[in-house]
Image (spheres, rainbow, N blue to C red):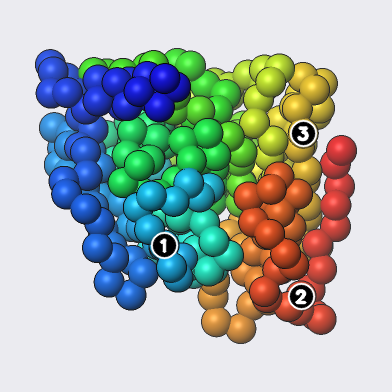
Amino acid sequence: MRARVWLAVAAAAIVPMAGAALKPIDGDLKPADNKTVRIFKTTPEGELKINLYFPEGWQAGDRRPGIVFFFGGGFVGGTPSQFTSKAEYLASRGMVAASAEYRVKNTHHTGPEKSIEDAKSAIRWMRVNARGLGIDPNRVIAGGGSAGGTCAAFAAFNTTFEPEGEDIAVSSKPNALVLYNPAIGAGKDTATNTKRSKEDQEKMAGFLSAWEATKGGPPAILFFGTDDALLAPARIFVKKMVAAGNRVELYTAAGQKHGFFNDRGGTPWHTVCLRQTDLFLASLGYVKGPPTIQAPADAALKKELP
């Protein structure tokens, strides 16, 4: 009975209607080299794609945990390829991983509210297409870096920006959060605001504060460099999560700046953060066994809060 109800809800979410934007998976997925690309949403500014990564032995009938990442770029630019290596690793650990496009200023000439709407759409799309993707709709994680981390966090804790024409009976709230230096409050001299006018900075500060840590929210892990101005507002977020009774962990990297977590040649921080992400997901039952990557000897995270 429960399965029939879910199918009915999923079907309703993709029935064409005025303002509807989600695009269902057309036919069976046939990943090449365990990956494929699909269009998940159509918008007035163009189609949005999602990169998909699958484990060895994946089948559409599976019920695996899923995770979708959102790239950084200050809501101005960026590309889903930022999270390719992290998505591929988590797919190797048995998850169905994704990295989604969303509308940004330089490409689509839209504001950050559309970025949030598209992130919520991507999470809802994962659930609507859960049977085709081989995932459990009750185990969908959202992650991202910088502005992409904002998108993921706002999917859980913002109700101001909602995509139109989608069936809200299919939740856009993630079951857990993996946040790499997210902008969840205004910091000075950061990549999110240094190129903006004073007026735009004030608007952005208001936008970045449009969240509320509510009781029953998803568990979250956050990563920051100690030299990142966005760390201070993130500590406020963490404290409010604790006050609301939600599980939250904050890890910092001494002397590191904004974006330290990225997979760049020669840096150990990508591996350090990814390994800690693995341990967090394992504690939630989303992956099993120890991480398959080793902790670098020349870098270590400090657990700050709670």
80, 280: nearer the viewer = 280
Which residue is denoted by mark 3 in the rendering?
247
Give the structural element (helix, strand or loop) at label 1: loop
The tag earlier along the polypeptide, 1 or 2, is: 1
Which residue is denoted by mark 1 in the rendering?
58
Q: Position of residue 306 (x, y in %)?
A: 87, 38
What distance separates the C-alpha of mark 1 from that of mark 3? 30 Å
138, 38: nearer the viewer = 138
Q: Position of residue 222 (x, y in %)?
A: 69, 46
Give the structural element (helix, strand or loop) at label 3: loop
Q: Residue at x 21, y 38 (%)?
A: 24
114, 130: nearer the viewer = 130
Location of residue 290 (image quadrant): bottom right
Q: Amino acid at mark 3?
A: Arg
Q: Amino acid at mark 1?
A: Trp
Location of residue 126 (image quadrant): top left
Q: Residue at x 27, y 71 (%)?
A: 32
Q: Quadrant of the N terminus?
A: top left
113, 274: nearer the viewer = 274
- Residue 254 in view: yes
Q: Amino acid at mark 2?
A: Ala
Q: Residue at x 71, y 45 (%)?
A: 284
What distance separates the C-alpha of mark 1 from that of mark 2? 28 Å
Neighbour class for label 1 at 10 Å: few (<14), some, many (≥20)?
Answer: some
The tag earlier along the polypeptide, 3 or 2, is: 3
Which residue is denoted by mark 2 in the rendering?
295
